[in-house]
Image (cartoon, rainbow, N blue to C red):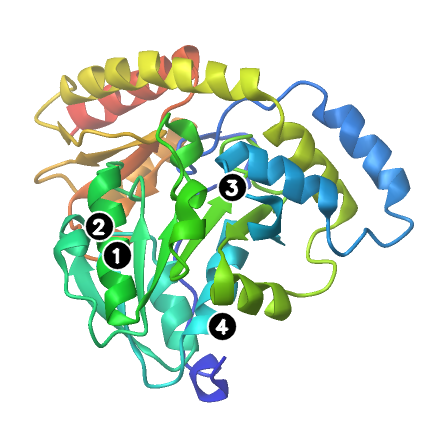
Amino acid sequence: MDPEATASVGRVPHGSSDDFDLLDFSANVNPRVPDGVRAIYADALDRARRYPPDDYPDYREAGATHVGCEPSEVIPTPGGLAAIRLAIEVVVERGDSVLVPYPSFGEYAREVRLQGATPEFVPYDALCDADPNGYGLAIGCTPNNPTGDAYDPEALRAFARHCSDAGTVLLVDEAFSGFTDRDSLAAAVSGFENVIVARSLTKLFGLPGLRAGFAVASGDCRARLANARRAWALGTPAARVGAHCMRDREFVRETRGHLERERPRLRERLAALSGSVEVYPSDAPFLCCDLGERDPAAVVVAARERGIALRDATTFRGLDSHIRVAVRTRAENDRLLTALDEVLADG
């Protein structure tokens, strides 16, 4: 990390509310958690009186099975963002240029700048057609946040090959891929030594405060990540709960089924609200909505007054009239629809 950059690179906005009196549609988090989590956490808290094994064999085994890679290719991290930072730290040098998609997760550009490097922005849906030559790193997000659409798997693999030919590392953020039935690119990293995949557990399993995730890589990238990662990167509760969650395949299946049923219903109902609202197609557990002439900030404030937290998406590069809403339970989604209908009808 570049010491000079740390003096000037500030924070970036995020969704999520710590007010438990609000129904939170601003964070893209599963409204359910797997059975048994509380008991696993309580047992892990007792075990936290000693350091965890630094190689986290059980967690890596569970992670490998979860995404279809080898346990040796899993590098545990305290959340998906920690995996992103670790990857950027070991790949990007001061003065590098990095291909960064937009509109997309704001932390990519921030982490690049913290390394003293320059983000070169490319439309997220044009990334796979970009020329990676001359870049220290290229970053992709699938499904993309905040738009919700995923890259075509073959196009992404073709871009990974182009990056390899160019000597460019490709970092793919799969924070929301667990909500889809698409194969993870992590399953193919053994054939792409220039690819790093970042995974987050806490969104799919409804536990964002737990902070558990991992990176997946092979060859030299894997060695660099493994060497640079911090000792005891995961606390015992995060490691044990995370492994338990990743083994609950029925929970993942049920989550995907609920999303496939509820997301199109919510999208259709949002588009039919008072006035014109354009709702983007999505493969993710959230929907991006263009409010047209309405002020997104005012809509967010008015919804909050009705007990609903929304994400003002105008903080994403390239969006100026948008909000983002999570897909929650049917009853919660209906409450959102009622509140938004009132807000939009008022003006």
Left or right of 75 in this view: 338:
left
Task: Give percent across and percent down for residue 101.
Answer: 24, 57
Q: Indicate the quadrant where residue 322 lies.
A: top left
Q: Is mark 4 on a helix, strand or loop?
A: helix
- Residue occupying the point 30% across, 71% down: 167
Is residue 85 at least partly visible in the picture? no
* CA distance separating discs 1 and 3: 19 Å
- Residue occupying the point 49% across, 27% down: 30
Per the image, the residue denoted by label 3 is 69
Sequence-wise, the earlier of marks 4 and 2 is 4
Query: Of circles 4 and 3, which is in front?
Result: 3
Q: Indicate the quadrant where residue 95 lies.
A: bottom left
Instruction: State the residue lying farthest toward the front.
Output: 191
Q: Are marks 2 and 1 in contact (CB under 8 Å)?
A: yes
Per the image, the residue denoted by label 2 is 158
Sequence-wise, the earlier of marks 2 and 3 is 3
Amino acid type of disc 4? Answer: Val
- Asked if residue 301 is positioned above or below residue 215 in the image, the reply reads above
Task: Give percent across and percent down for residue 81.
Answer: 49, 55
Per the image, the residue denoted by label 4 is 90
Per the image, the residue denoted by label 1 is 161
Q: What element carries label 1?
A: helix
Task: Give percent across and percent down for residue 178.
Answer: 44, 32
Sequence-wise, the earlier of marks 1 and 4 is 4
